[in-house]
Amino acid sequence: MNGKDKPTRAVIYCRISRDDEGKEGAGLGVQRQEDDCRELARKLGWPVVGVFVDNDLDANGIKERPRYRDLLAAIGDGVADAVLAWHTDRVHRSPLELEEYVDICQPREVPTCTVKAGQLDFTTASGRMVARILGAVARQEVEHAIERMKAKKEQQRKAGLKNPSPRPYGYRWAGPAKLGLLEIVEPEAAHIRFAYAELLEARTPVEAIARKLNEAGSRTPAYEKRPAAKWTRRTLRQMLTRASSAGLIEHDGEVTRGTWEAIVTESEWRTVRAILADPSRRTSPGPKPAHLLTGIIRCGGCESKSFGVVQKSGRPVYQCRNRWCTSKDLVAADALVTAAIVGLLGKPESAPALHPREGVARLEAAKAGLRARLDEIARAVGKGWDMQQAMIASEEPQAELAEVEAKLASAYTGSVLDGIGGRDDAEERWFSLPIGRQRQIAAALIEEVMFWPTDRRGRLPRGAPRLDPETVGIRWSDLVTDRQPD
């Protein structure tokens, strides 16, 4: 009974979290906690006027506990005369939260009674001291648990195992997640390879790749609290830059080899990450390009570069918008310029001119050799070398390896011609590319396309073909100077 001889109105607070494995009460569901607290209330003769439950939430003060805040409000509003809990650590593990709790309970003389740890009386200095000691002990247990968790993750990382977490797209756990073993989910792996190919070979924008995956029925992985969803630009970027797809573990900027099978190569992963991190990439898709030559046409009559696309006699044409000097059939002009571009790209001897960057194959071979040297040094430690000798011996190959990996990371960012220049299937690859990539290639190879008027009125003579090749001229860029197509 309280001072006014009224029944002591009790409220129950229950909490359970996932970080309590191995701790007393960890397997105790919130319903069992409530049952034990109601039994305590019966023994004390206190009517229960409310129950507040936070399920699957920690009591360390990091995450907001909505029902705990409701508990404080109930105490502050005078609804509760006492709080019942299964143990003090079910209520607090944060000293800061405990002090807030004391400040609310002390002036209202609201005690906290627990099933396992007895009563906390905040009206006396001794009672507050006991509460603070129990809070400090609970906080120490939290910090020890965090240390153990970090140590376990570090041990797994060094062993090449994946830390337990939501499964990465493209894989599933091979056994319990805590073992850190992964195996490939082939349908998802195929989508990853498709996305990589679209970005590396066709330079398709991430948003367009996401749209293609969604149309093919692909979805993000479903987790316990997050259902599968359509790919977005953000979620696809996250998937493409995840090291696990390359069989790697990335932690604090350090990359180590995992024990599971890779879906893509390390070189491909580093390349994709470098491409997506390139600050020169546009963050907005902008208007969708529709025509190959807009932007690189110059009028041979008035020297203007102002060309638009209009309809004439039911067909699209490129039209000079300055003095209306000339117009060219769009389909025929695009076909003429495309043939010239494909003819240049298809020449094997053009590859060096179109790819001034260092060869990826040579960089991969250099990386393999450097890693082999570092492995030999590591084995030498077990044969009598001390750590100082190993550190000195590994300094140079480590520096060289960092340089090689940096070059590999940027190898594909230097030219829009990667994957098509100097190939015998250049024509096939060209027509498989989106119009945006075709325009990029055309702009890289061509300084300008000259359109000369066909007669003084800018019209085709009667009976003439839709496009006279003699009225179209191509001025190649410095990249292919003196390399005119046949």
Image (cartoon, grey):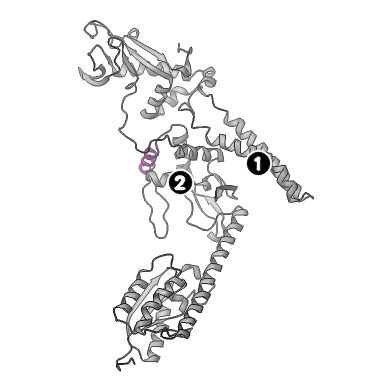
| Residue receiving disc 1 | 398
Question: Does 217 appear in magenta?
Answer: yes
> Which image quarter holds the N terminus?
bottom left
Give the residue type that dot 1 points to: Gln
- Label 2, residues with CA under 10 Å away: few <14, some 14-19, many ≥20: some
| Residue receiving disc 2 | 239
Tell me which secondary structure the magenta stretch mostly adopts: loop
Q: Is residue 416 above or below residue 79?
A: above
Is there CB contact under 8 Å for labels 2 and 1? no
Q: Earlier in the sequence, mark 2 or mark 1?
A: 2
- Label 1, residues with CA under 10 Å away: few <14, some 14-19, many ≥20: some
The picture places residue 221, in percent across and down from the top left corner, at 43, 52
For the point 34% across and 7% down, the residue is 470
Give the residue type that dot 2 points to: Met
Q: Nearer the viewer, residue 49 or 122?
A: 122
Q: Which residues are magenta?
A: 202-228
Q: Is residue 389 left or right of residue 184?
A: right
For the point 46% across and 17% down, the residue is 478
To which quarter of the image does residue 156 belong? bottom right
Q: CA distance from mark 2 to mark 1?
A: 29 Å
As drawn, the residue found furthest toward the bottom would be 5
As drawn, the residue found furthest toward the right would be 384
To which quarter of the image does residue 454 belong? top left
Question: Does 59 appear in magenta?
Answer: no
